[in-house]
Amino acid sequence: MSAVWLLAFLGSFLSLPISDGLQVAGVVSLISGLLAYIIADSKADFYYNSFTVLVGALWCIAGISVICSDVPFVSLIYFFFFSVFPLTFLIISRLDKPLVFSVIRCITFTLAVVSLIQFYSFPDMLKFGGAHWPLEDNNSLAVILGSGALMFIGESLKGGRWSYHYLVAAILTFAGVMTTGGVAVFFGFFAVLGGMVWLSKVSSYKPLILFLMGVLFLICTMTRSDMSLYHFVQTWTGSVDIITGKALMERNTISGSRLFIWGSAIEIFKNNIWSGTGIGTFFLYYPEFRHIEDDSAGIAAHNDLLQFAAEMGVFAPFLALIIVGSFVRQAIQKIREIKNTENRLNLLIPFSVFGLIIGHSLVNFNMYVLPSLMMVGAMLGVCSDHFQQRKISGHFLKFASKTICSGLLILGLIPLWGCYVSEYYTGKATKALARENIQEFSDSLNLADMWGGGQNGRAVLVAAQFASATNDYNRALILLDRAESLNPQLVQIHVERARILSLNDLEEAVSEARHALRMDPGSLTARMMVSDILYQLNRSDEAYEVLRAGLDGIMKSRNPAPFYHILASRSLEIGDIETNKIVLSRLGKLHRQ
């Protein structure tokens, strides 16, 4: 059983040469099947406590947000994704914990070595100067490596013949953290480490002192790292100015765009207080509320409590706070009751890892990254075993083994694979269309629609765009209406509809294009569409102002050159020399890049 969960954990890093979506589906299937197997074991005893109820309640809230969502297909995908947390929590008590912990430590150590190789040998692999593979986000990798370093130093503090081996592994794993540029993890690590050492009451602080000496050596010698002493000396003046001055309220190197994103997330929450927008849909609603100076990808809120609130409503973050607060209170109380140092560390190590990941979630999105989500479930499950539990009655188990084992795998895994396979074929169809391979496009799109049960709005949108490109406008409009009913947050639906309507009804077309621009003010495609239709309506002054406003704020386009060329031409026509100079300057920078 432990091997199955560890295989799923290894697969959660999304580094296999297959679709990420299919890999996620495989991970969820492995964990779901493992839980079903455990429940079907009639000889097993099962227990529950307050955390079982609380985690189950959070899972239910996530499910309710799917039902209430305007984009249920997308929410269902993320609901399955989020399910690895409660599933891992439920099954971890049945696993061989020493084995699980040993393998997790080995995985984090291996990742640290890979990160060091990336950092010094493959600069092209770095993201913002930090290692990130096999994850997309370097901060997410940092928290996994930081968790591994905590586990190693915790084992070292126990003493014994392997103490110094664990110590060396802890230092090397921390070196991996430094390659990522994860500053928040860097400082959070020492805060959590201090708490762990203080509560453990170890007899000898020698391993800790040696570890800190090793860390100091790394800080002095890894000059390319953002956490090095060299980097700190170079940037400390600017950092102080950011913290003490008004620059903290602007885009900066400390907070990035987080303050802007948090403000926008609060606005989304205000519009969807009770049930939220649906788990996993933040990225669809965010463009409408994006701050004008926010240059982030806009995929996540960088604060899981705020994202829970926006996506699942007010009860989700409230329940999450209860889980964390109750967990901290009970864990500290239990630690103080334990007299043996090794036993205290057995509880403190998973407790500290949990604290590091959850604390970092206040400035990142760990609950939306598969490995850290599984780590949270595992650490909470391990610690939960130390608290008072009640046995589930044999009658209930007999009932559960017949219903959950069949219902979970049949009713759960079929839609799971349907959603992810549909997304896979939608992506495949989009790529085929770009290559003008119409046969592959058609086959992939049909499979996407079939696997998605006709509920994948993105697949329908792609079909509508193809119909429009082949001048079958009536069918395109029908498909666009269907796509909007499935996913009303897709801006491309309104842009494509505006383009078709502009052939016959300019007034309705400009209304549709303006709607698209309101949904995503950063969309240059929508902006150029509005401006073009206004020019056709002979409202040239208004058309130019719409186009000119695109220079303010962040432009969401991989290639803004067409927008710049149009604006340069229009600004020259009306004699706006100042704007023309700005546009030509930006075009020059773009060409040089």
Image (cartoon, rainbow, N blue to C red):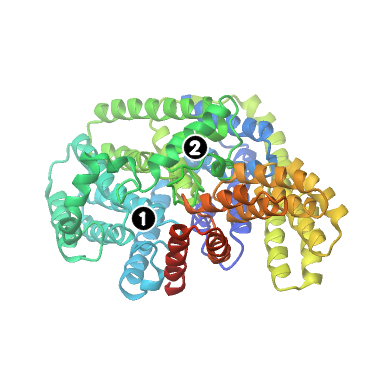
Query: Element type at marker 1?
Result: helix
Task: Identify residue type, mark 1.
Answer: Arg
Residue 46 in sight in this render: no
Residue 26 in sight in this render: yes
Specify whether 26 is left or right of 163. right
Dot 1 crowding, Cα within 10 Å, few <14, some 14–19, many 20+? many
In the rendered view, would you say 407 is above or below 531? Answer: above
Specify whether 313 is left or right of 135. right
Question: Furthest residue to the front?
Answer: 575
Residue at 52% x, 39% y: name it. Answer: 289
Instruction: Give x and y (percent) for residue 454.
Output: 80, 48
Residue at 78% x, 70% y: name it. Answer: 440
Q: Earlier in the sequence, mark 2 or mark 1?
A: 1
Task: Identify residue type, mark 2.
Answer: Gln
Q: Which quadrant of the view contains residue 593? A: bottom left
Nearer to me, 251 or 218: 251
Q: Which quadrant of the view contains residue 73? A: top right
Q: Which residue is mark 2?
A: 307
Instruction: Give x and y (percent) for residue 360.
Output: 36, 43
Query: Element type at marker 2?
Result: helix
In the rendered view, would you say 48 is above or below 537? Answer: above
Dot 2 crowding, Cα within 10 Å, few <14, some 14–19, many 20+? many
Nearer to me, 390 or 530: 530
Residue at 81% x, 48% y: name it. Answer: 505
Q: How many marks?
A: 2
Instruction: Give x and y (percent) for residue 98.
Output: 38, 49
Instruction: Give x and y (percent) for residue 132.
Output: 40, 61
Nearer to me, 131 or 249: 249
Nearer to me, 327 or 510: 510
Residue at 42% x, 28% y: name it. Answer: 321
Specify whether 332 is left or right of 220. right
Q: Which residue is mark 1?
A: 105
